[in-house]
């Protein structure tokens, strides 16, 4: 990882309250692996002590980009920044996804909202194409469909209000696809990023069908480098369990290792 002051190339609205931020970082960009994140200090926020973590969305040449949603004081300030302004960034951070191999398991990517941001680089670098399942509450929460389709991936969208794609939760078409695959010669591996309830449901599907699965855990991070221990989750450790940090041992974990409830 590197800590650097980087320059904004562009910062444009994507849909509704979502933005795409492109940063020029020639030393950081070549190091980035799918599923890693950047810890960003928004310099105009003089009173902000903590950085904010963002999944790394795309890498192109000496730049990398972040897909984010304007949800509070920090991201609102970020959305107002313009080309040429600077940010302090620590990146790349965390343990990312395992890139699928050619001729191996067919990858099924599952994302909720801007969880899509953590998935694009994985899809782009995977020689084995598969299906992307993306879900959101409304049409405006469905992101990056064209980009994934341009990579040769099939995209299946769901919205809770039925305004785009299939109505319901993103786990429904995922379950249907896996259920049908039982009657085919098909080996799947699941990759997911999104809200914790969605990840828990996907982990259960993977367990029920005995499928490998990697989950990018969405925990609140303060330091981003493993010092503060604010982002720990319980995981299996032999016959017992332990806490691991989502910012260093994660954010991506093997779903089989995650304990959704701490044993009594």
Image: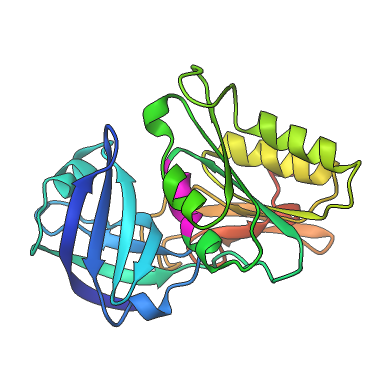
Report the magenta stretch's main SS: helix
Q: Is residue 162 left or right of residue 179?
A: left
Q: Is residue 48 left or right of residue 182?
A: left
Q: Which residues are magenta?
A: 114-120
Q: Which residue occupies the extreme top position in the image?
A: 161
Residue 245 falls in image quadrant: bottom right
- Residue at position x 70%, y 71% from top? 102
Residue 180 in picture, x, y percent from top left: 83, 36
Q: Is residue 208 left or right of residue 48?
A: right
Residue 9 falls in image quadrant: bottom left
- Residue at position x 52%, y 42% from top? 194
Residue 213 in picture, x, y percent from top left: 71, 54
Residue 29 in picture, x, y percent from top left: 34, 75
- Residue at position x 65%, y 53% from top? 130
Q: Is residue 1 visible?
A: no
Residue 235 in picture, x, y percent from top left: 69, 56
Q: Nearer the viewer, residue 1 or 158?
A: 158
Q: Nearer the viewer, residue 256 or 106?
A: 106
Quadrant of the image for the N terminus?
bottom left
- Residue at position x 54%, y 55% from top? 232
Q: Nearer the viewer, residue 202 or 240?
A: 202
Q: Magenta stretch containing residue 115, yes or no?
A: yes
């Amino acid at each position: 990882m590197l800590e650097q002051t980087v320059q904004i190339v562009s910062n444009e609205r994507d849909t509704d309250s979502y933005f795409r931020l492109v940063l020029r970082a020639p030393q950081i960009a070549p190091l980035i692996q799918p599923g890693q994140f950047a810890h960003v200090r928004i310099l105009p926020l003089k009173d902000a002590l903590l950085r904010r973590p963002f999944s790394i969305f795309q890498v192109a040449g000496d730049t990398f980009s972040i897909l984010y949603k304007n949800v509070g004081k920090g991201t609102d300030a970020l959305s107002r920044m313009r080309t040429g302004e600077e940010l302090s960034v620590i990146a790349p951070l965390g343990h990312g996804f395992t890139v699928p191999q050619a001729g191996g398991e067919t990858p099924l990517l599952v994302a909720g909202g801007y969880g899509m941001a953590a998935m694009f680089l994985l899809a782009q670098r995977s020689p084995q194409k598969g299906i992307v399942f993306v879900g959101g509450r409304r049409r405006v929460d469905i992101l990056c469909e064209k980009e994934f389709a341009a990579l040769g991936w099939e995209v299946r969208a769901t919205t809770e209000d039925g305004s785009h794609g299939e109505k319901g939760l993103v786990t429904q078409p995922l379950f249907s696809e896996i259920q049908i695959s039982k009657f085919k010669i098909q080996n799947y591996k699941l990759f997911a990023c999104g809200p914790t309830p969605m990840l828990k449901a996907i982990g259960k599907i993977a367990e029920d069908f005995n499928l490998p699965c990697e989950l990018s855990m969405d925990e609140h991070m303060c330091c981003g480098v493993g010092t503060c221990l604010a982002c720990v989750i319980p995981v299996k450790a032999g016959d017992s369990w332990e806490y691991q940090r989502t910012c260093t041992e994660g954010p991506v974990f093997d779903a089989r290792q995650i304990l959704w409830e701490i044993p009594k």
